[in-house]
Amino acid sequence: MHTGAAPDYNGDPITAAAKQTLRNLASWHQVLTTEITELDTELRWLCEQTNLALLDACGIAPETAAALLIAASENSHRTRNEASVAVLCGTSPVEAAARSSVRHRKR
């Protein structure tokens, strides 16, 4: 993006190009950070309207709450009890057998 006067290269066009690229990246970072903040606020509001108790649970951020709400609504026939929800979320224990012992691990 050209902004008018030619940059002062001081004899080193590579350094000047690198500096301009870093300025452009910093600008995009600021724009995207603002957009993420706005979307997070909207997502939190939507989750609060749908299921406030879910956001009150320890460790549940709006992104996680939204994913759980979407998964549960699209798979309501698969969420009959706590165990079926754990399977749907990939958190149910599965057997991890070694030669002489059987233990459970998370998926």
Image (cartoon, rainbow, N blue to C red):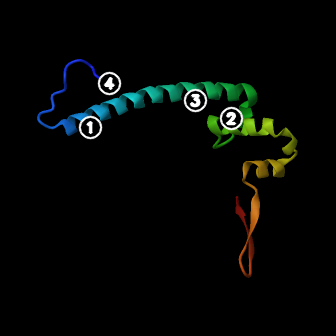
Q: Nearer the viewer, residue 17 or 54?
A: 17
Between marks 1 and 3 in the image, the one whose residue lies nearer the viewer: 1
Local SS, label 4: loop
Between marks 4 and 3 in the image, the one whose residue lies nearer the viewer: 4
**CA–CA distance in space, label 4 to label 2:** 38 Å
Verify CB contact (< 8 Å) between mark 4 and mark 3: no
Instruction: Name the residue: 77% across, 48% down.
Output: 88
| Quadrant in the picture for the N terminus | top left
Local SS, label 3: helix
Above or below for 2 versus 79: above
Above or below for 87 versus 11: below
> For mark 3, what is the residue?
40
Local SS, label 1: helix
Sequence order check: which comes first, mark 4 or mark 2?
Answer: 4
Specify whether residue 56 is in view: no
> For mark 4, what is the residue?
1
| Quadrant in the picture for the C terminus | bottom right
Instruction: Name the quadrant containing residue 29.
Output: top left
User: Farthest left residue?
Assistant: 11
Verify CB contact (< 8 Å) between mark 1 and mark 2: no
Identity, as a three-letter code, of the amino acid under mark 1: Ala
Verify CB contact (< 8 Å) between mark 2 and mark 3: no
User: Mark 4 Cα within 10 Å, few/some/many (few <14, many 20+)?
Assistant: few
Give how far across and how far down residue 23 sits, in percent: 31, 31
User: Mark 1 Cα within 10 Å, few/some/many (few <14, many 20+)?
Assistant: few
User: Mark 2 Cα within 10 Å, few/some/many (few <14, many 20+)?
Assistant: many
> For mark 2, what is the residue?
66
